[in-house]
Image: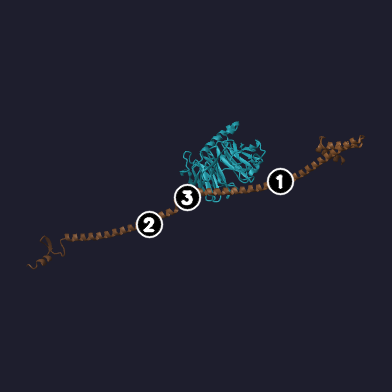
Chain colours: A cyan, B brown
Amino acid sequence: LQRKLRSIWSISLLILLSRYKDRHLHMSVFSQSFSPCGRFLAAGNNYGEIAVFSLSSALSPDATDLSQTPILTFTAHEGPVFSLFSTDSHLLSAGNGEISAWSWAELIKRNTKAAWTRRPNYKSSLEIPEINAMTVNPTENSLVIGGGDNNIHIMDLESGVFKSVLQGHTDYIHCLSVREREGEILSGGEDGAVRIWDHRTGQSVHCIEVYKYEECARPQYGKWISCLTTESDWMLCGGGPSLSLWHLRSMSPTSIFPLSGCQRQANFYQDMILSVGEGQCVSHCLLGGEVKAQIPCTPHSLNTLALNLNSTDNRVRVLTVGGSSHQIDVFTNLSYRTFSLSF
Amino acid sequence: MGAVTDDEVIRKRLLIDGDGAGDDRRINVLLKSFTKWCNSTGSPEEGFTQYQRMLGTLAQCEFSMGKTLLVYDMNLREMENYEKIYTDIEQNITSAHDKISECKKEIQRAKRIRKNRQEYDALAKVIQQHPDRHETLKQLEALDKELQQLSHIKENVEDKLELRKKQFHVLLSTIQELQQTLESKYDCCRCALLWQDGLWVCWTMWRSLYKGWV
């Protein structure tokens, strides 16, 4: 619901605010993605723009203030860019109900022509549902899209054909995750359910209603699930209910994290869990349920967290977070904020 | 060619002693005093003192030369020492690099181990909440035994019930028959009945009873 309101607001304010100098005050960064080589970062904001930053020049010893600004900014969609994903050669961006692909090689050369733009088959043509989450299923080379029409669309990346639609959620989908080994797609939505789908049959294998578990539920925030991530047999999910770690084999919650505020993105990293959400900090948690550290950052509320693990060059192995600010914080050492990139 | 070497010489001399004080001046003074002494026309004592002075200056020159030679040797040895220290430090640096990469690998391994331990702990916590398997099995066994006993008792009770039912049935049916026979006036045979001493007696019975009297 928050995202829907935000998108309506931003589209209506787009024309007014994007022309004014204080557009920076109203900018929110919703999505980030690193290039396959690891030297560039693309970020999408609520005005529908994508900015490409050069990490190698921002992190080099002779960086100036200019290197902390984008090398390229362009308007990709009419609506906010809620999701960005990088494949080996292309950057996929989702906005205004459609998906566009941009070649990374072309973007680095400052050429902003999209390679292709496709739209899933929506049943109703009256309202265009926004796309909230995108992920790639590597075994099938297919793109999994979840959005405002309560369904998950699966598109084959090579042919561009929309292969199947997974129906089952009763409200729009916030987040997606893929378990490669078991061939499962997990989706979390506004209806508070985490559904596990088998990608071959297209059937919902399990449905976990997180808010029904007493230890996780936080009725004062609601039942929606806004962040979902998996690693082998473990799953992290959170949103209205507290961020919790689940063991998927036994379908039971093992640890609940005492973080105030709703978490919007969480990742597993080495032996820790990194999580961002409402609250001006990045939370580091241990698998047992303790919050080890909370590192302060610039935006007052964070929407996205990205780890650059693509590159072997240690210099660009950074963590970047973005949220309700035009600045994107970069962490070279997880313990403190190094500097901020400015949209 | 000659000009180049002259430049070299000039540069060297300027480098060594450019300000005109010190050894160079002493040598020039010595040469001048030597030529003056050779061409001197003074007394032999003066000549002798000048000769002594020249010897003294010569000794000074030799002394400073000896000093510079020693300093030169010392510099060479210092250079060697520094070279050695330099190679030592380089070796230390490479070994430290190796140790750092080893330690980094160790830390990765330790982090993985810690993660596994934490996962194990989290699962153990969940498992602990469920009751012990042995206890549940024992409880199940006890319940089974109880169930068997109770079904045994039930069978016994049912058998007894059946038996009593049958017995009562027999009793009731005989009572009913008896009642019927008593109520019916034709007891043994269908002949006329006579009232005799408060009893209905049939004709054959009356005859046999009172036969002797007639």
Closest to the observer: A153 or A241? A241
Closest to the observer: A217 or B195? A217
Between tags 3 and 1, which lies in front? 1
Q: Position of residue B117 (x, y in %)?
A: 53, 49
User: Is B184 rendered above or below residue A223?
Assistant: below
Between tags 1 and 2, which lies in front? 1
Q: Secondary structure at mark 2?
A: helix
Q: Is residue B142 left or right of residue A78?
A: left
Q: Position of residue A144 (x, y in %)?
A: 56, 46
User: Is A161 rendered above or below residue B187?
Assistant: above
Q: Marks 1 and 2, Cα distance to the nearest angstrom?
A: 87 Å
Q: Which mark is residue B85?
A: 1
Three-letter code, disc 2: Lys
Report the chain holding disc 1.
B
- Which residue is denoted by mark 3 in the rendering? B127
- Which residue is denoted by mark 2 in the rendering? B145
Q: Is residue A341 left or right of residue B41?
A: left
Q: Is residue A341 left or right of residue A261?
A: right
Mark 2, other Cα within 10 Å: few <14 / some 14–19 / many ≥20: few
**Residue A284 position by quadrant:** top right
Three-letter code, disc 3: Ile
* Dots 2 and 3 on the same chain: yes
Three-letter code, disc 1: Ile
Q: Secondary structure at mark 3?
A: helix
Q: Marks 3 and 1, Cα distance to the nearest angstrom?
A: 61 Å
Closest to the observer: A217 or A141? A217
The answer to whether any part of residue A251 appears in the image is no
**Residue at the bottom extreme?**
B212
Assess whether mark 2 and mark 1 are in contact (beta carbons under 8 angstroms): no
Label 2 vs 3, first from the N-terminus: 3
* Dots 3 and 1 on the same chain: yes
Report the chain holding disc 2.
B
